Each structure stands twice: as structure tokens, then as C-alpha cells.
Image (tube, rainbow, N blue to C red):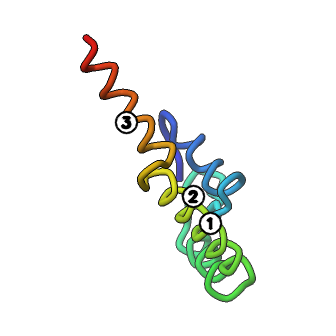
Amino acid sequence: MPQMSDQSTNAKYIKDVWKIGVKAQPDGKGIVRQEEVEHCISKIMEGGGGKEIQRSAMKWRELAKKAVDEGGSSDKNIDEFIAKLVQL
């Protein structure tokens, strides 16, 4: 359950943007109960949500791999960063 700093933003991205997770709903006291955790796990393991999460995770995995591979955006960015450091 997100509580501080950027945790709420991270949780929103994980569920709504990246689609690689589900959100556990707290009770009236802000506590996520065992039953809710079980419900979330069932939704992923037994429902269709698990397949969508797996597909999304694989998509993001491939995008991240391309970014860090030679010639990818992260690879280029680190090269540019090092070049600027050398100029100092």
C-alpha cells in the first residue's frame, strides 16, 4: 500500500500505465487485509488479468533491453554524459 513520497505515483504507473500490477484496496482504516491480498493474487493467478500483466511485463522488458543494448537510448545517453564529463 503506497504511503509516502513517490509511492502513490509509482503504484499508479504500475497499475494504470505499465499494466504490470494490481492495486490492493485498503479497508476504512487504511489497512490492506489478508482477504484483499488473496483477492489480488487470485485476480492475477486465476483471472485473465495475469495474462495481460505478463504480456505487459514482457513488452517493458524488451523495451528496457533495447534501451541498454549498444546503440540504445540509455547507451547513447551514458556516452553523451561521459563525453561532457571529459570536457570539464
Considering every residue shown, the one lying at the far top of the view is 88
Query: Please, what secondary structure does the residue beneath circle 2 have?
Result: helix
Name the residue carrying label 2: 63
Residue at the spot 58% in from the left edge and 42% down from the top edge: 8
Query: Please, what secondary structure does the residue beneath circle 3 have?
Result: helix
Above or below: residue 50 compared with residue 57: below
Residue 11 location in percent, x, y?
59, 50
Residue type, numbered disc 3? Ile
Residue at the spot 70% in from the left edge and 52% down from the top edge: 17
Considering every residue shown, the one lying at the far bottom of the view is 46
Count neighbours of disc 2 (C-alpha within 10 A) and say few if under 14, some if 14 to 19, many if 20 or more.
Answer: few
Residue at the spot 67% in from the left edge and 61% down from the top edge: 19
Report the front residue among 3 and 34. 3
Q: Are marks 1 and 3 in contact (CB under 8 Å)?
A: no
Q: Are marks 2 and 1 in contact (CB under 8 Å)?
A: yes
Residue type, numbered disc 1? Lys
Residue 86 location in percent, x, y?
24, 20
Residue type, numbered disc 2? Leu
Above or below: residue 56 compared with residue 10: below
The alpha-carbon separation of the residues under discs 2 and 3 comes to: 17 Å
Q: Which of disc 3 and disc 1 is earlier in sequence?
A: 1
Q: Residue 78 has which mark?
A: 3
Residue 3 location in percent, x, y?
50, 42
The alpha-carbon separation of the residues under discs 2 and 1 comes to: 6 Å
Report the front residue among 24 and 76. 76
Q: Which of disc 3 and disc 2 is earlier in sequence?
A: 2
Count neighbours of disc 1 (C-alpha within 10 A) and say few if under 14, some if 14 to 19, many if 20 or more.
Answer: few
Name the residue carrying label 1: 59
In the image: residue 44, left or right of residue 65: right
